[in-house]
Amino acid sequence: MSGYRQHDRFVWSARDGLRWLTWRAGGATAVFPTRSGGVSPSPWDSLNLGLSVGDDTVRVSQNRRRLCAALDLPAERMVIPHQVHETNVRWVGSGEAGRGVDDVRTALPDCDGLVTAEPNVVLAVSTADCLPVVIVAAGADGPLLAAVHAGWRGVDAGIAGKAAVMLARRGRLVAAAIGPSIGPCCFVVDEELRARFARRFPASVAAPSWAAPSAAGTDVRGVNLWAAVVADLVEAGVPDDAIDVAGVCVSCDARFFSHRRDAGLTGRHLTLAWIPTADAQSRGGAVAAGE
């Protein structure tokens, strides 16, 4: 899978003390933030973007607005779902903008994937180990975009492929990205779950052949969720050489939150994905930051 080795479209960016990975393809933009630059104290330090982990809601709202300000995005354009580790994927537009931004009670219910064709509607999915997956298609009237939260249950049930198929009904699949998430080095499971993934996604239990930083330390009991999602996307029709994997294990990398590493006492990231207007693309905003 050549796409599994291609992650050069991920670029580090920084602004106002925040740092994130930016990915652009097919007329869409996605951002995968680190945990730095926010106002939350330990154990959520510091850019906690999750409202359901015990942090003060005022601080979380401030963190969300700090991130949006650094990206030149109106926070009120975000759409945030209430995630349930299932495969519900929903089309959204301006009518859903603002859902879940400051109050979990307004989040889109029972939804782990969002799809839009509308520019400047900011799709947001929450993770702290699970895979944030972004998919882009070329439609007759412009880009089509999906953002998916994929825990191991969602990966096994095929949520990424389901979202890709929804886009493919209205356009041509052109690119996808898998952001920072738990890697095969740290997603160690019991034999029953490993056998389950081996049946559905044989590549997910194979020895990694790509040059990711954590590859040498991969546990033989681990499952490679990145490889499973790549296989799901390819089966749905995304070109394999257009699938970019960040290859960053959040459990290994202290710049990110990890539910497993921190025994549940940690914050949450929000992956943001949107279709910029031509004017927004020309304005830019953040500065590139080398590693």
Image (cartoon, rainbow, N blue to C red):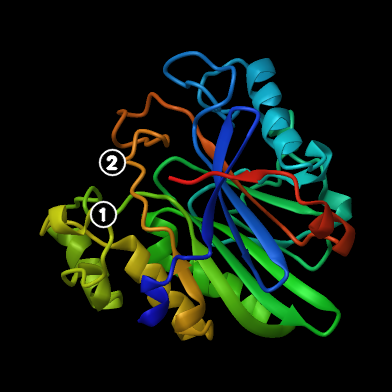
User: 10 Å neighbourhood of mark 1: few (<14), some, or many (≥20)?
Assistant: few
Quarter in which the N terminus is drawn: bottom left
Q: Residue at x 53, y 86 (%)?
A: 237
Q: Nearer the viewer, residue 282 or 125?
A: 282
Q: Give the numbered dot on residue 34.
A: none
Earlier-in-chain disc, 2 versus 1: 1
Q: Which residue is mark 2?
A: 252
Q: Amino acid at mark 2?
A: Cys
Q: Amino acid at mark 1?
A: Pro
Give the distance between the C-alpha atoms of the residues marked 2 and 1, in whole angstroms.
10 Å
On the question of residue 103 being in view, the answer is no
Q: Nearer the viewer, residue 219 or 263?
A: 219
User: 10 Å neighbourhood of mark 2: few (<14), some, or many (≥20)?
Assistant: some
Q: Nearer the viewer, residue 234 or 252?
A: 252
Horizontal relation, residue 191 to residue 40: left or right: left
Image location (x, y in percent) of residue 10: 51, 59
Q: Residue at x 75, y 34 (%)?
A: 69
Q: Is residue 264 above or below residue 94?
A: above
Q: Is residue 262 above or below residue 76?
A: above
Q: Which residue is mark 1?
A: 213
Q: Are marks 2 and 1 in contact (CB under 8 Å)?
A: yes
Q: Residue at x 41, y 63 (%)?
A: 155
On the question of residue 287 being in view, the answer is yes
Helix, strand or loop at disc 2?
Answer: loop
Image location (x, y in percent) of residue 79: 74, 47
Q: Nearer the viewer, residue 159 or 208?
A: 208
Q: Residue at x 53, y 65 (%)?
A: 9
